[in-house]
Image (tube, rainbow, N blue to C red):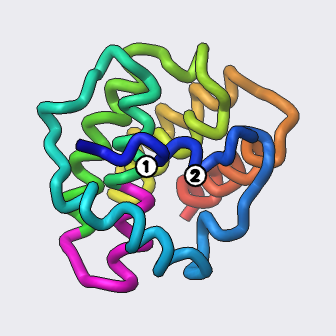
């Protein structure tokens, strides 16, 4: 069963703070220790697609945590990212971006960028532009999407 503290670990109950460790190696060993078994035992059939917290914790596991673990132990990142993209699509279809904190939405949309899917990145940028909030996470993710689309 998936480690239920992924959301707490990732966001620490504050969805408005940018955490530099999200995009560097400083917590790779800790993440490996806490979540490697969850990744190995991942089963798509155990996800409640009608529960946004279940969807986002699995997106984080498959798309973000897998990248941290990959720096410790090589694995097939594309496999996990493709699974995360399916969940990201569910995030869009169920419009969880309207009810959940933006930080969750930002990470829910990242798998499309990791798969270099410019059409999906454009779609998610359009959604982000409609949300439009004053938040450092919003600003950083929006700018990164715009840079990606302009390259």
Image location (x, y in percent) of residue 144: 64, 56
Image location (x, y in percent) of residue 41: 16, 54
Q: Quadrant of the N terminus?
A: top left
Numbered disc 1: secondary structure: helix
Give the residue at x 12% y 32%: 45
Q: Write the start and end of the magenta stretch as one range.
A: 63-76
Q: Is residue 75 left or right of residue 8?
A: left
Callout 2 environment at 10 Å: few (<14), some (14 to 19), or many (20+)? some
Image location (x, y in percent) of residue 107: 53, 45
Numbered disc 2: secondary structure: helix
Q: Quadrant of the C terminus?
A: bottom right
Question: Is 24 in front, or is 121?
Answer: 24
Task: Decide if residue 47 is in sight here.
Answer: yes
Displayed quadrant of residue 91: top left
Q: Earlier in the sequence, mark 2 or mark 1?
A: 2
How many marks overall?
2
Please say whether residue 148 is one of the residues in the magenta stretch.
no
């Amino acid at each position: 069963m998936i480690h239920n503290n992924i959301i707490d670990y990732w966001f620490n109950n504050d969805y408005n703070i940018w955490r530099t460790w999200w995009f560097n190696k400083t917590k790779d060993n800790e993440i490996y220790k806490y979540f490697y078994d969850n990744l190995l035992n991942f089963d798509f059939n155990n996800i409640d697609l009608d529960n946004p917290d279940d969807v986002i914790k699995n997106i984080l596991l498959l798309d973000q945590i897998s990248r941290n673990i990959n720096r410790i132990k090589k694995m097939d990142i594309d496999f996990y990212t493709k699974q995360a993209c399916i969940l990201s699509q569910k995030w869009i279809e169920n419009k969880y971006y309207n009810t959940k904190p933006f930080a969750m939405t930002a990470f829910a949309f990242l798998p499309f960028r990791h798969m270099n899917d410019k059409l999906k990145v454009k779609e998610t940028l359009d959604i982000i532009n409609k949300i439009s909030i004053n938040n450092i996470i919003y600003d950083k993710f929006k700018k990164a999407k715009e840079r990606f689309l302009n390259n």
